[in-house]
């Protein structure tokens, strides 16, 4: 039994990770989508975290968010929704990004699309702490133009342990504190949540594959680095309790994830 392969809700109850961990898709052409990474919801109304380099793939050379993109959302009774990504934010200080998936409040003001949300932890891991990620690596192009078959999205767990916590990094690609792990991070798994005892302690950043005879090496951004990130473009349904918790004095400002924790939007 995979003791660490557990995602939990706010009550500590085990949930299907597909209800809060989602593939991030870029439109290649009409009806054809490519999975470029993995993300996970942090609020009920569609804010999700992922790796910054995943969201950068949706921008033009001037860093403008221009490419049509979606996250594939599993709803109740096995229903599937393609939720359009309507806003993205890049951290800049680490490989962390946050996006807003459309909850369709304009079309369904009294019944906006809601989702499960992951529980976050700012815990600093120790050597050999057991870890697991859930992600959507190495999927083929999803072709919705062919009526004779339905595209299949593949996902799975990948387990490992923390090798060490690096505080003073001189790595050219990761010049900030990070965890080194032996989790296998394949293409498409970037941005996925890394769980420790049911809570998300970090985000998949980069993995190295040295072949079958070598140990895997990957890097995970600690969740603690992302809590100060400012979030713009939030789509909070007016009828939600989350909207009522935001003070009038800050409604027109960019809130940090720490602010959203304080208002009860994000679970820790």
Image (cartoon, rainbow, N blue to C red):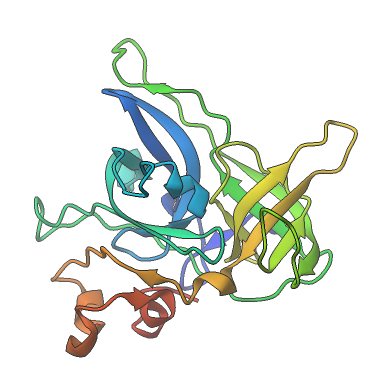
**Viewer-proximal residue among 173 and 177:** 173
Whether residue 1 appears in this view of the structure is: no
The relative height of residue 170 versus residue 66 in the rendered view (above or below) is below
Report whether 174 appears left or right of 80.
right
Q: How many marks?
A: 0
Across and down, in percent, residue 227 comes to 49, 75
Q: What residue is shown at x 36% (from left), y 66% (from top)?
A: 43
Which residue is found at the position 51% from the left and 49% from the top? 53
| Horizontal side, residue 76 vs residue 135: left or right | left
- Asked whether residue 96 appears in the rendered view, the answer is yes
Residue 190 falls left or right of residue 213 = left
Residue 9 lies left or right of residue 265; in this view the side is: right
Residue drawn where x is 14% and y is 71% of the image: 239
- Residue found farthest to the right: 213
Which corner quadrant of the image does residue 207 belong to? top right
Which residue sits at x=76%, y=55%? 181
Q: Where is residue 256 shown, x and y percent of the image?
A: 39, 76
Up/down of 152 relative to 48, above or below: above
Classify 95 as above or below 146.
below
Which residue is the extreme one toward the front?
A: 62
Front residue of 181 and 238: 181
Image quadrant in which you'd find residue 222? bottom right
Residue 83 position, x and y percent, is 28, 45
Q: Residue furthest top?
A: 148
* Residue 188 in picture, x, y percent from top left: 55, 38
- Image height check: is 25 above or below 40? above
């Amino acid at each position: 039994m995979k003791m660490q392969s557990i995602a939990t809700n706010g009550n500590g109850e085990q949930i299907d990770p597909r209800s809060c961990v989602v593939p991030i898709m870029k439109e290649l052409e009409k009806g054809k989508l490519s999975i470029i990474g993995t993300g996970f919801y942090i609020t009920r109304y569609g804010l999700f975290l992922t790796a910054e380099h995943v969201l950068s793939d949706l921008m033009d050379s001037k860093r403008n968010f221009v490419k049509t993109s979606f996250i594939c959302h599993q709803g109740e009774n096995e229903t599937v929704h393609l939720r359009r990504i309507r806003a993205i934010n890049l951290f800049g200080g680490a490989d962390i990004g946050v996006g807003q998936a459309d909850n369709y409040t304009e079309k369904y003001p009294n019944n906006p699309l809601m989702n499960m949300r992951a529980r976050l932890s700012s815990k600093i891991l120790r050597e050999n702490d057991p870890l697991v990620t859930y992600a959507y690596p190495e999927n083929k192009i999803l072709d919705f133009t062919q009526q004779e078959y339905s595209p299949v999205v593949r996902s799975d767990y990948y387990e490992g342990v923390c090798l060490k916590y690096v505080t003073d990094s001189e790595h050219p690609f990761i010049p900030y504190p990070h965890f080194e792990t032996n989790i296998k991070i394949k293409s498409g798994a970037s941005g996925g949540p890394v769980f420790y005892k049911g809570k998300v302690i970090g985000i998949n950043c980069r993995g190295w594959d040295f072949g079958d005879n070598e140990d895997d090496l990957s890097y995970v951004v600690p969740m603690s680095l992302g809590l100060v990130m400012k979030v713009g473009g939030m789509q909070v349904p007016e009828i939600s309790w989350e909207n009522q918790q935001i003070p009038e004095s800050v409604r027109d400002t960019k809130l940090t994830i720490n602010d959203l924790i304080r208002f009860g939007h994000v679970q820790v």
